[in-house]
Image: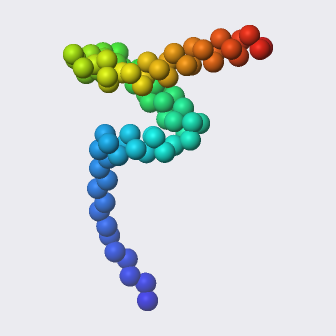
Amino acid sequence: MKVEVKQISVNVITPENLALALKHATPTEFADFWFEFSRITEKDEKLIDDFAKAMAPSLGGHRKRALNKICDLMKYYEIESQKKG
């Protein structure tokens, strides 16, 4: 006998859970996520502007510290790869 049960599922991800998921992602998975996020959001200039405003309050330096470090390291590794290539 086969019984079908309809289910409704609601999944909620908090900023903390998303951060933890990205923390445990491999570097390639994190880069893939960031590339996809960038691709989706860069199509909407207002959205990018809103993100920038949200990151800019008086404690914004703390909010963007990791992002700035990643960007600085990306520049470094891009320069290093150009030297080798």
Q: Does the rendering let one see residue 47?
A: no
- The extreme left residue here reads 58
What residue appears at the point 70 percent right and 16 percent down from the top-left corner?
A: 81
What residue appears at the point 54 percent right and 32 percent down from the top-left corner?
A: 31
Q: Is residue 6 above or below residue 76?
A: below
Q: Is residue 15 above or below residue 53?
A: below
- Residue 65 x, y percent position in the rendering: 38, 21
- The extreme right residue here reads 85
What residue appears at the point 35 percent right and 46 percent down from the top-left corner?
A: 17
Q: Quadrant of residue 43?
A: top left
Q: Nearer the viewer, residue 80 or 39?
A: 80
Count of marks overlaid on the render: 0
> Residue 44 vs residue 80: left or right?
left
What residue appears at the point 31 percent right and 67 percent down from the top-left corner?
A: 7
Q: Nearer the viewer, residue 20 or 28?
A: 20
- Residue 11 x, y percent position in the rendering: 31, 53
Q: Quadrant of the C terminus?
A: top right
Q: Quadrant of the N terminus?
A: bottom left
- Residue 55 x, y percent position in the rendering: 29, 20
> Residue 60 vs residue 39: left or right?
left
Q: Does the rendering let one see residue 17?
A: yes
Q: Quadrant of residue 63?
A: top left
- The extreme bottom residue here reads 1
- Residue 51 x, y percent position in the rendering: 30, 21
Q: Nearer the viewer, residue 41 or 4?
A: 41
